[in-house]
Amino acid sequence: MKVRAAVLEEFGAPLAVQEIDLAEPKAGEVLVRLVACGVCHTDMYTASGADPSGYAPAVLGHEGAGVVEKLGDGVKDLKVGDHVVTLFSPQCRECVHCLSPRTNLCMAIRAEQNLGHLPDGTTRFSRDGEPIRHFMGTSTFAEYTVMPEIALAKVPEEAPLDRCALFACGLSTGLGAALYTAKVEAGSTCVVFGAGMVGLGAVAGARLSGAERIICVDLSEDRLELAKGQGATETWIGGEDTVQRVLDETGGFGADYTFEATGIVSVMRQAVESARMGWGLCTVAGVAGKGETLDIVPRYLITGRRVCGSSFGGVKGRDQVPQLVQRYLDGDLDVDPFISHRITLDEVNHGFELMHNQDGIRSVIEL
């Protein structure tokens, strides 16, 4: 079938919205009609050429939600008409990682995803007979996409798909960092560095976990105001004195939990140094630039601080994304303020411009 999609032709150039070919789903795969897709920093990061694992040509986009249109042979858990959220981090429910409560890094199609292919090592997108690769196994900057069943989370039909799309990456990453990776304890003190989509999700996750004190640090007053709406008890403008301020506010010990959601290595270091001596945990969810490294003074570790990374917030997508969406439906999460711009597929490059200028939290493509 013919579909319109935003294709990354070459790094550093605008995406080209054009008509390309999409093949039928094969065994274990599903054809999804996309309804909404968030424009995420990872898409812009790859398009710029800064991502060392990036590839082109490829159909970008990974923060999508839509409706199942057709099933390949052997699909068991989905039916035509189901509403789904796309998962760049799949869940086969069978591999050693899926069976472990300690990680969400499914091994079933991970290597193929990194190459821009589906599980059989091929792609369903093409143009004039030449293959165009999938991005993060999803490719949601398109009217339709084909994905493995194990990379789709079925969500309640009453949940608006434009809100559901945010759970495909940024929002779940932040929520999960607090709920599933750090496992924030009730009554604790948390400091969240960054009030973008991921940081605001971490604020909300800390609130849902019962944290007593949630400090959000950012350079934008507007974003900090949004953090208050997600449960931040205090908001600070960041600066070189942030670590000392955290120490001063916590009896010299530091926060029980810190979260880094900016991707800036100097801020990552602040998050580490702000964690409590003895047992503090710093969770790093931000994506640093190509070739950048994090410099940690060993004494911060020797005195008991811990540092961990968090991919997709540790969320087991098929099982836990529907649970998070249900919390939205139950009124535990206020997702509406995150959607700052609604754009068309033809305006995808404008979505990148808005993100580059830090204009709003999330632009959502309506398809």
Image (cartoon, helix red, strand yellow):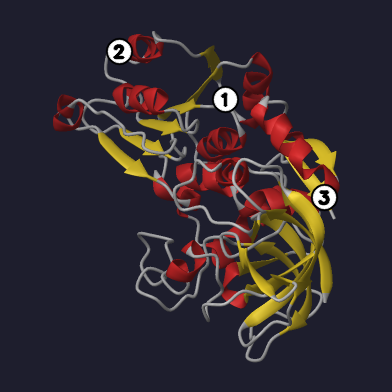
Left or right, 49 with reference to 303: right
Of mark 2 and mark 3, the one earlier in the sequence is 2
Q: Quadrant of residue 363?
A: top right
- The numbered dot on residue 232 is 1
- The numbered dot on residue 2 is none
Q: Secondary structure at mark 1?
A: loop
User: Percent position (x, y) of residue 366?
Assistant: 84, 50
Residue bearing mark 2 = 251
Q: State whether residue 246 is above or below residue 336.
A: above
Which residue is more in the foreground, 210 or 88? 88
User: Percent position (x, y) of residue 208?
Assistant: 55, 41
The C terminus lies in which quarter of the figure? Answer: bottom right
Of mark 2 and mark 1, the one earlier in the sequence is 1
Q: Quick one: which residue is furthest to the bottom in this view?
A: 73
Residue bearing mark 3 = 345
Of mark 3 and mark 1, the one earlier in the sequence is 1
Q: Compute the Cα span from label 3 to label 1.
A: 34 Å
Q: State whether residue 30 is above or below residue 351.
A: below
Q: What is the three-letter code of the residue carrying label 1? A: Ala
Q: Secondary structure at mark 3?
A: helix
Q: What's the residue at 53%, 81% (across, down)?
A: 120
Q: What is the three-letter code of the residue carrying label 3? A: Leu
Q: Compute the Cα span from label 2 to label 1.
A: 20 Å
